[in-house]
Structures are given as C-alpha cells and as structure tokens.
Amino acid sequence: MEQPLVSCIMPTANRHKYIPFAVDYFLQQDYHHAELVIIDDGKESIAPLLPKIPNIRYFYTPPLGTIGAKRNYACEKAQGEIIVHWDDDDWYAYDWISQQVNFLVTSGADICGIKHIHHYSAIMQAFWQGDAENRNKPDSKPFLAGATMVYRKSFWEQHPFKDLQKGEDEGFVQTPGAKIFAHDYIDGFIAMLHPDNTTIKSFENRNHKKNR
C-alpha cells in the first residue's frame, strides 16, 4: 500500500539562521512520501538557503499577518492528505513523520501530538524534561503543543485556524467534537528556547520543567 502524502508546513519570517537546520531535519526523515511547504513573509527571502528539489515547495509572500493566517495559507498550499506541523526553530527526530502518521492512523483521532514537551535553552545550557504521563485524562482540558500537531487536511478544511498570533493552536485543538490524542513519543521532539520564540517561555524559572 502506498504511503499517504504528508505535507509538513513551516511558516517562517526573518529567521535565516534556523532554516538550514529545519530543512536538514526534514531531509533526514525516514518517511519519504512527504513535502515541506514553506511560507515566508519575512523582509528578505530565504530562497538562497533552500535546496532546489521538488519536495521542498517555497512561497514568498507579502506579510500575511498572524501565525494562524500563515498556517491556513500553508494548509491551502499543501498537497498532502496529512498535515504535519514543522516549526522552523525546533528539533525533530529522523522518524518523526513516520511516528506522527502512525499515531494519527492507529488512534482514530482528528489531531495528535505531544502534550508535555521537552525544552532546551542554548543560552542557559539547560534542558527541561517533558512528561509522557497523564496525557489523555478525560477530565482535563484538551491541549497539544502546536509544533507537534498532525491532522488530516480534510479536518482542517472544516476547522481552519483562527486569525491569531498566539493561541491559534490551542483554539484548533479545542474544536468542539474533535478527537484529540496525546502520544508518548516525547523524545522525538525538542522545543528550542531562544529570544525569537513566538511565545516566550519562563527561561529563568527552572521549576516549570524538571531539569535533566
């Protein structure tokens, strides 16, 4: 059976130093029926940093506004049946796409991802341990880290992201009636903390994650 085409969507702007790493993580994937859809509305195009290969599709646009608007635009351009979020500044394991697809297909969920993620700060040289426990408690508020989400394009077509700069992923997960599954492959992803993060974490508070 042929693998479903997966579209990894990567909104970006003015983050040139992170792009080679994000592209390299994609090219190392063991799931080969995938494309990387890059939406760039920054001041200067990142085109010179991108390999010219068919499965990296680059769109340089005038300013689109919020992260929610950029994610929607990326989903529109996506050719795949399955959408995987691919943030430009985070680390993804070589089998991330394979694992994401497997969790989505086997769980029967509308959206999958990680609830309690690992964080790393190069500035502080500190690592905060994620947690794979208590992931899917029925009495807890649905939450998945935006950079780890996977879903079908057909689901997004019915429930596009809200036009928000922050919290667009939270609203997406809380779509009424959506089936959410938080999986346990927390070692497949690390959120990299730095001053350019869209959402600023509490760098100084070492208690917000267990420091390894």
Image (tube, rainbow, N blue to C red):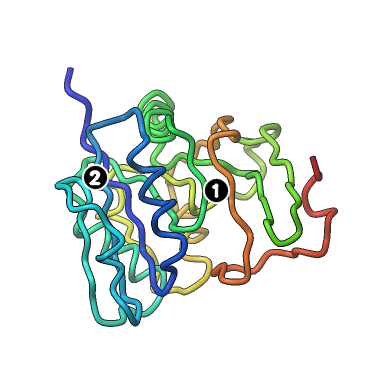
Looking at the picture, tell me which residue is in the foreground, 207 or 176: 207
Residue 69, position in %: x, y?
34, 71
Quarter in which the C terminus is drawn: top right
Give the side of residue 119 with respect to residue 2, left or right: right
Residue at image location 40% in from the left, 75% down from the top: 66
Kind of residue at disc 2: Glu
Direction from residue 196 to residue 35 in the image, left or right: left
Q: Quadrant of residue 76?
A: bottom left
The x and y percentages for residue 84 are 36, 45
Q: Is residue 95 left or right of residue 141?
A: left
Tally the marks. 2
Question: Mark 2: which secondary structure?
Answer: strand
Query: Horizontal and vertical percent for residue 179?
Result: 45, 40
Callout 2–callout 1 Cβ contact below 8 Å: no
Please name the residue shown 69% across and 34% down the image.
134
Amino acid residing under circle 1: Leu
Quarter of the N terminus within the rendering: top left
Residue under label 1, please give it: 144
Hey, which residue is sitting farthest top in the picture? 1
Q: Is residue 179 left or right of residue 132?
A: left
Q: Residue at x 40, y 59 (%)?
A: 19
Vertical arrangement, residue 44 with respect to residue 67, above or below: below
Q: Residues within 10 Å of mark 2 (few under 14, many from 20)?
A: many
Closer mark to the observer between disc 2 and disc 1: 2
First in sequence: mark 2 or mark 1? 2
| Image quadrant in which you'd find residue 103 | top left
The residue tagged 2 is 35
Residue 96's spot in the image, x, y percent?
44, 34
